Amino acid sequence: MYLGIDLGTSNSAIVGNRAGRLDLFKAVSGEDVLASVVMTDRHGGRYVGKRAYDQLRTAPQGIAARFKRLLGTSTTLPFGPAADSITPEEASAEVLRQLLKQMRAGVGDEAVAGAIVTVPAAFNQMQSEATIRAARAAGLERVGLLQEPIAAALACLENPAARNGLFLIYDLGGGTFDVALVRAIDGAVSIEAHEGINMLGGSDFDRMLVDALVKPWLQQTFALTGDWQRRPEYRRLLALATANAEAAKVELSTADQAIIFVSEHDARALDEAGRELFVEVAVARADLEALVADKIDQSIALCRKVVTDHGYTTADVSKVVLIGGPSRMPIVRQRVPAELGIATDLDVDPMTAVARGAAIFAESRDWSGDEAQAKPARVQEAAPGAQVSFDYEARTTRERARIRVTATKGASGLRVSARASDGRDYGERLVDESPVFVIQLADGETSVAMEVTDAGGAPLPGSSRTLTVTRVAAAAAGAPCTSTISVKVEDGDGVRAINVLEPLVRKGETLPLKGTKTLRATRPISPGSDDAIDVELFEQADGVQEPEANLLIGSFHLSGRDLPGYAAPLRSGEQVILHWSVDDSQLIRCSIELPEQGLHLADHSFYADELARVDFGTNGAAFATDALIAADKALDDFGQLDAAVRARFASELARLRTRIAGEFTRLDGAREADTYRSIAEEARLLRQDISRLRHRPELRLQMVRADLYRVEASARALLASLSQDDRAQFEQQRATAEQALDDERFRVAERAIEAMEGVLRLALSRSPDYYLEGFRWLQSQRHLSTDPARFDALVTRGRAAADARDINELREVCHKLGQTLNLPREQTADVTALAGLRR
């Protein structure tokens, strides 16, 4: 048996595939889906599903819900009555264990050959890695991942009348939105395009109801002042309001009115005047639709972009398939087909389709090796020493399969016959005519006995074979890579350098893939030393060139301590070969080869996704604030442009400014880890949109020249700190930048400007105030420390050094303080520091 599992933000489902028959294993409550909610009682018993969900609406403390989007972070969630904690990964494992219990209740101890767990197309590397770990913790040994839109597409093709055409999969779930453009030919699926939004789903709609309706109602009805939303005594009330807002949202799919209600007994909170708080807010469907309309429009715009960017019009698309619980909302079912002009397929169950498609995909994999691989669609088979071979379709979505018979050695007079397991006899042919038998297939497996006889009619057992052909409901050509995976390299001319991203795998390429990338070290490493280079991998967004505006997904730290004592030093300019592979779950594996040293460090674990993690429960507010400030600062760079240029792009700049302001407003009222995660993700998307605008051809010259003017202004402010050599180097690079801009060689100009900034940084580092200012900032970041006791000791040591003006000691303290901070790498100077590798 093969399993397909939809591990959802709000609900999860499990389907078994046994000999081509799909069985949905229902929850204990009798529902098709299991609520993705986990709780524990005072006696340590854990509950997953409806009981935990019902408890969430009356006593939400310590109940884990909506944790899927926090996978791949180091966030911990309050859990249980004893104020324990649980990670999103552990909570996901609990949901998976319960799903497996549902399966066992239906089929007993039947062996599981392999399982597929689905993930959103917009999931990043860390989220996918965490999902695999959760599945293995739940007891799934042979497990892989599949993007949810692909699974949904496979489920659509169960209907015999819908096995051909160009489809649009619109997957609006509890936490994410995915869209895929799918081509189906006789039930075989290929993904032509896909996009996703990692932080758009039903959970966001719930929060919008609370922010727009419940909070204002509470402020108007009760005496609440200041930042009451962040105060711990109101945390329970707001959690209950959010849970009941979700229930109201679901009710509004079939009703025109609903009530978001929290009783005084459940709220257990008083206002400033001592009155008991409660919530009783009437919500009309029109209110909800007005709130979510912009988000629905955003999803529709992405659908339209996916279609048009790949050379199609909406008239070319035969249907749009709605997947996910929120897709049941009337505004989605009415607006999506109306805006796109594409008919909607309402025959697919939006709640279980993804799990069904995953079960179909799981059966198509061969799980016998270390990594699952696609079962071969075509097989050429012959026994050793046989006189004939059989070339046939071992797996097909069609009603008929072709078996070609060819001679491998002298076949004069040999004859071959075919008889299928359903009793059909396909006659006898001469082997030397290379006959082709067309076999009618039933669903599932069809056995075909191919008997070879000699000229006298005597059977030749050594050449005869029984072939098995499997007819499947649907098949996927392969999973596409959902984002471009790139390595950070230095692009320079020996004097000036900037960081760029060098693609390893491009978005849309069919997985699995593997390859090598030959690069060169930018700095030397001696065996046993602390010298090091970092091989940093990023998920690169389309059209976004700067590493700092993309998502760091892993770093491979190569230091002198990794080199054996007998090895020759790695010199600057010597080859560093990166061996990489991406499996069809989109999990990345890498190793490093040093040809000059004769080393291939394949057994050393370089990958460390913790570098790109953050605890959104503890540090979410600070992280989201920093991310928004970085986006705001990037947008401020446009203020250096001429007024006429700014006027040309005023509407786009205003939209970006409005989005940033909106996120700062959300931040003011945020209280949950998921909200901080959502704001940080939106800040990254803002940085990427700003980067795309910055690199528009009509703006590139003005933006680079504005950067030059900015650095020149900084130099004038630091004139007293610059030595004669500093000034000479600075002027040389400035002249290079000016000439490059005149010639429109923007990359050269950017390298020269970076070199100018390097001169200024070096001059600043010689000033005592540089480390004094750095220390003042670092000591304010205790909330991000992974070792508070060590942090406090270093701060004490740093204060003594600052009082004594001992700059060497202060420099060392600043370095060690930075090592204790759990900052994601995109928030630190390391991402903007020059890469350890170059082309």
Image (cartoon, helix red, strand yellow):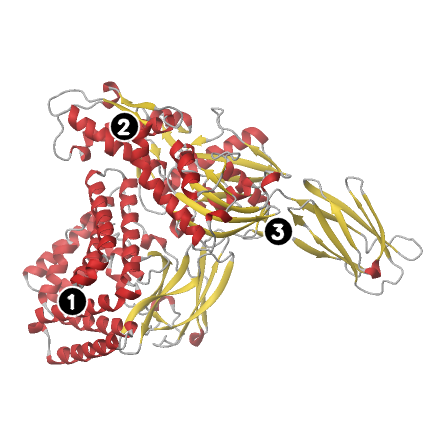
Q: Which residue in the protein does label 1 denote?
A: 710
Question: Is the residue marked by circle 3 packed among few (<14), some (14-19), or many (20+) residues within 10 Å?
Answer: few
Work out whether 799 lies above or below 114: below
Instruction: Locate residue 669, reporting x and y percent.
Output: 20, 38
- Of circles 3 and 2, the one toward us is 2
Position above or below: 26 against 704: above
**Residue 523 can be seen in this image:** no
Task: Please name the residue that numbered disc 3 is placed on.
Answer: 375
Q: Nearer the viewer, residue 758 or 604?
A: 758
Among the two numbered marks 1 and 3 on one chain, the one whose residue lies closer to the N terminus = 3
- For label 1, the crowd category at 10 Å Cα-Cα, with few meaning under 14, some 14 to 19 and many 20 or more, is some
Q: Quadrant of residue 327?
A: top left
Residue flagged by tag 1: what amino acid is it?
Arg
Q: Earlier in the sequence, mark 3 or mark 2?
A: 2
Q: Nearer the viewer, residue 508 or 758?
A: 508
**Residue 428 visible in image:** yes
Q: Dot 2 corresponds to which residue? A: 241
